Image (cartoon, grey):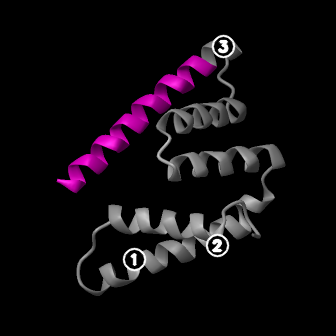
Amino acid sequence: MAGILTREQEKVLAGWVDDAIKLKGILELVDGYAARVIITFVDNTGLEKLPEELKVSLSELVTAAMDKDIETVETKAAEILDSLLDIPGLDDEAEALLFEGAVKILVGAILKLFEKKKE
């Protein structure tokens, strides 16, 4: 594993992208493969350069997403954002609450989108 994702995680993430993006004709036949190539490239070339603590958190986030553990996904995503961003004028506690709320809204919207696509 050169990056932070296992081959299985790369495969699953590419499948999610393939399911989420519907193209026409031959493009639909290759979009899943293209997604896998891009995910693997970004993982192996970009994510490897991240600080170790962030790589561990991102790996835990992906694992939780694959396990469909929404609560952990929300918590991990908010923690990652909070560790990377500093909003002037807000203390750490207020920032954490802001990121937690924003992530919950985003996750809820994504889940609704996937529910609609299944219908």
Which residues lie in the magenta part?
96-119
Q: Amino acid at mark 2?
A: Phe
Magenta stretch, main secondary structure, is helix
Taking the view exactly as shown, the residue that stands out farthest to the right is 52
Which residue corresponds to the image point at 59% horizontal and 68% vertical from the top-left?
8
Q: Few, some or many C-alpha atoms within 10 Å of disc 3 (few <14, some 14-19, many ≥20)?
A: few
Q: Secondary structure at mark 2?
A: helix
Q: Amino acid at mark 1?
A: Asp
Q: Which residue is mark 1?
A: 31
Where residue 74 appears, as percent x and y from the top left, is 52, 34
Where residue 79 appears, as percent x and y from the top left, is 65, 31
Asked where in the image residue 18 lies, by quadrant, the reply is bottom left
Q: Are marks 2 and 3 in contact (CB under 8 Å)?
A: no
Q: Is residue 108 shown left or right of residue 74?
A: left
Where residue 106 appears, as percent x and y from the top left, is 42, 36
The numbered dot on residue 93 is: 3
Which residue corresponds to the image point at 66% horizontal and 29% vertical from the top-left?
82
The numbered dot on residue 44 is: none
The numbered dot on residue 41 is: 2
Magenta includes 77?
A: no
Q: Is residue 53 shown left or right of residue 115?
A: right
